[in-house]
Image (cartoon, grey):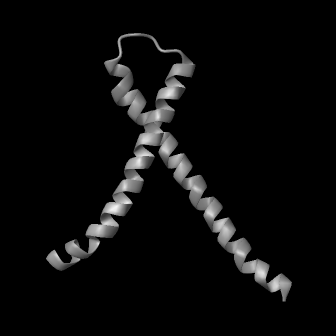
Amino acid sequence: MGHQATKPLSIIHTKHLSLCSTMSSTLNSLGATLFEDFVRPCLDIKLSDKTSNNIIKLIVVIVGALCVLMVFFVDKVGGIIQVGA
């Protein structure tokens, strides 16, 4: 019985890991794209790699926080949007 209980948990764990990997890749590529397309052209100074990486990390944190806030917003307002449609 102990072996049967671990199979569903390992499937859930595998799906969770793949989801985290996909989210990480998406946020990192979005952060780098936003930095290269919008931030770097606005700066007239040459940035070191360390500074560029720190700015990209900050962008990723901001975008991630915005995504989490939008999830809560849609959760609260979702019923209102369905009634209005």
One can see residue 85 in this view:
no
How many numbered marks does the figure carry?
0
Q: Residue furthest right?
A: 2
One can see residue 12 in this view:
yes
Of the 4 image quadrants, the one containing the N terminus is bottom right
Residue 17 in the figure: left or right of residue 63: right
Q: Residue at x 21, y 72 (%)?
A: 81
Residue 64 in the figure: left or right of residue 19: left
Q: Residue furthest left?
A: 84
Q: Looking at the picture, does residue 2 appear above or below residue 57?
A: below
Q: Position of residue 35 (x, y in %)?
A: 41, 30
Q: Position of residue 9 (x, y in %)?
A: 71, 75
- Residue 44 lies in quadrant: top left
Q: Looking at the picture, does residue 52 appear above or below residue 23?
A: above
Q: Residue at x 39, y 53 (%)?
A: 67
Of the 4 image quadrants, the one containing the C terminus is bottom left
Q: Residue furthest top?
A: 45
Q: Residue at x 69, y 73 (%)?
A: 11
- Residue 83 lies in quadrant: bottom left
Q: Position of residue 34 (x, y in %)?
A: 39, 34
Q: Residue furthest bottom?
A: 1
Q: Looking at the picture, does residue 70 appear above or below residue 40?
A: below
- Residue 10 lies in quadrant: bottom right
Residue 84 in the figure: left or right of residue 78: left
Q: Looking at the picture, does residue 14 appear above or below residue 42?
A: below
